[in-house]
Amino acid sequence: MITHTKATAILILFLLAIIPINAMNTNETTMAKTIYVDDNNTIGPWDGTTTHPYQHIQEAIDNATQGDTIYMYKGIYYEQIRINKTLTINGEHKNSTIIDGGYSHIVVSIIADHVTITNLTVRNSGGYMNDAGIMINTQNVTIADCIIYRTKTGIYINQTQGNLIQNCSFHNNGEGVYLRESSYTTIIETLFCHNAIGLNSQGSHHINIIGCYAHTNGIGFFLNNSSICTFSQCTAYNNNDNQGGFFLEFCHDIALSKCIADHNGFGIRTKNCSNIVITQTDILWNTHFGIKMDDAQDVLITQSTITKNMRYSIHATNSSCTLISNNIYDSLFGLYAEKSKCSAGKNWWGSIFGPAHRERLIQDRILGKKQSKITTIPFLRLSVKSAGAGWNIDETRFPVSLPTSRYQPIVIPGQDSDGDGAPDIWEEKYGYDPYVSDNHLALDPDHDGLNNIEECYMDQWGANPFKKDVFLEIDWMQSPDGLINKPSQALLTEVKQLFAENEITLHVDMGELGGGEEISYTPQFSYADLRDFYWNYFLHNDLNNPRKGIFHYAFICDKGPGAGHTFIGWDELDSFEISAQTLQEKQPSYTRDRLIVGGSVHELGHTFGLIADVYGGIDNMIDTMLFSKQYWNYRNYKSCLNYFYTYKILGYSDGTHGPGDFNDWENLDFTFFKNTQFNLPK
């Protein structure tokens, strides 16, 4: 069991162990100079002076010496650069001094120590596994006041140490920062938004993350097989309703202090972890779990405020934890444990009478199952005044400009007399005048989320601009046991009919519409691997793949990181994963075919914006407990989005089944999968 003394010692060791080693090399020349670059100097001469700046960054690097500064004037520099000397590269203005990699593998490659890059934008790397905006293979590199977007990986720190990222913004990337087997990394005052993963740490240690924000990602902060890491005054908020904020897997010695996990699917998730310390942290409004512990040992949560989580505040399975001096209140479940040991004395549970062991109006409920041991006495009769982070999220702190349309437009072959992007033959087919220009990018007459250019592109596969179309690509993984992960055509036909009855044409691509394929077997894989499958098999490593924003995407496998969940593979919630074997083990009374298709329709509903915020019966695990209040509240909600009916009903509810029902069909948001927001409803 972790004591106060031990917890304090752990925090002190973390802070002493994580010391940035970004000191400048003392052997650098004292004759450093400034070299200038201006992409507007296209005719020369070029000598790097203010009068005759180089046109290209690489030319300036090649002519620089150790310790020099390269100053870039505003402009767009279409090049890939290789920094092989200790240099400082400084942009005139970070929003308008841009290095555009043109989808090359790596935009900026750093192979020298003590390099500093400040005040510029890096964008448009390639989309393959090891492609990146900035690749760091050396130590003591500083990246500050930069914007990195539209890359597979924003900054890839590869098997090195002592690097600093400060006051940067990462958006629209496969991941913002990837730490691969690296150490002594410090990330300060940095934003991660609209990425599949904000920070991805694999096999790394001694990481210090201070004052960082992560929102509207699949996962804000993902640590796998990492250790001795601290989060201080960081927040993860409004991240994926089916993924979430701080994810720790196979980690040890991790500390969160004065952090905020606000309105995620999972606020904090620890799986196969040990020695986790969470102190003075706010964990609130998370849709599924405030804190989820699976096979986690020695988790200490102290002086934290854990409240208003929509389902469970704390959920522990095969875990051991100590809760002390916390305020835990105003959720359906304060603490739920299976096969776990939870020492939870000296907490305030929202009432002078302590926690409840049955459903009540005021106190949070406590439930231990399957030989769990929970102790809550003595409980506090007053709230802990010092609990919580002590600060509030400032949503204006990191302003960011996000792309609102396709970066490269869809080009459709054929005669286009009026030049509006739609060929004459398509315009004539659907009653448009081929000689009068229409703003087809803004036209969506059937309100299905696909504009007329996208409808025109999909005309080859049956799209109609005046009838709602939904396109779903399905990839499925081979099973080593010869089991079938390809969805049943018979059940899919049944689902298509349900959609048709609601005037929606569901097009399913399993090889017939330009995508959909069987994928070689991969054993147990992580969220980061799932993201890579998305890039490999849906995007085909192409950041301008026109299918993005048209197709929803499904990935069916034996066992993935979740039994079934939606995930963000790049920047929007357009995808889901179904683990057929995991579902079969959990639900043995259903056939594999039924589990795959039922789970798929459920998750597809989330990509239409039907998430836990929208209605209390959606993704409510508690309403599967027969005769609970939640069961009685939502038993008439006859929808596959209701966990009680997920595999019994293959469609959505129309709201006609009495009290507690909800009309899913009327509330489908066809644009959600391409314009995703998880803001907490007011």
Image (spheres, grey):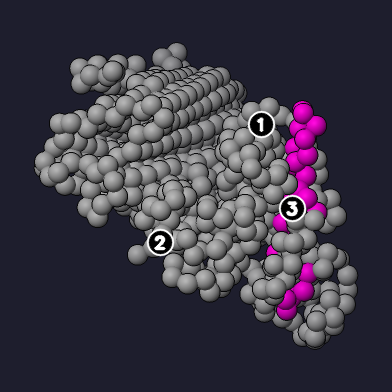
Label 3 or label 2, whichever lies nearer to me, is 2
Q: Secondary structure at mark 2?
A: helix
Amino acid type at mark 1: Asn
Which residue has dot 2 on it? Answer: 633
Q: Is residue 464 magenta?
A: yes
The residue tagged 1 is 130
Mark earlier in primary sequence (1, 3): 1
Q: What residue sits right under mark 3 in the picture?
A: 473
State the quadrant of the C terminus. Answer: bottom left
Along the horizontal axis of the image, is 230 left or right of 583? Answer: left
Where in the figure is residue 190, as x and y percent of width and height?
41, 41
Instruction: Report the magenta residues as a range.
Output: 463-489
Label 1 SS = loop
Q: Label 1, label 2: how many angstroms apart (C-alpha)?
A: 49 Å
Q: Position of residue 295 (x, y in %)?
A: 45, 25
Residue 526 is tagged as none
User: Which of the marked residues, 3 or 2, is nearer the chain's N terminus?
Assistant: 3
Mark 3 is surrounded, within 10 Å at the Cα level, by few (under 14), some (14 to 19) or many (20 or more) other residues, namely many
Gap between marks 1 and 3 measured at Cα: 25 Å
Residue 99 visible to an observer of this rendering: no
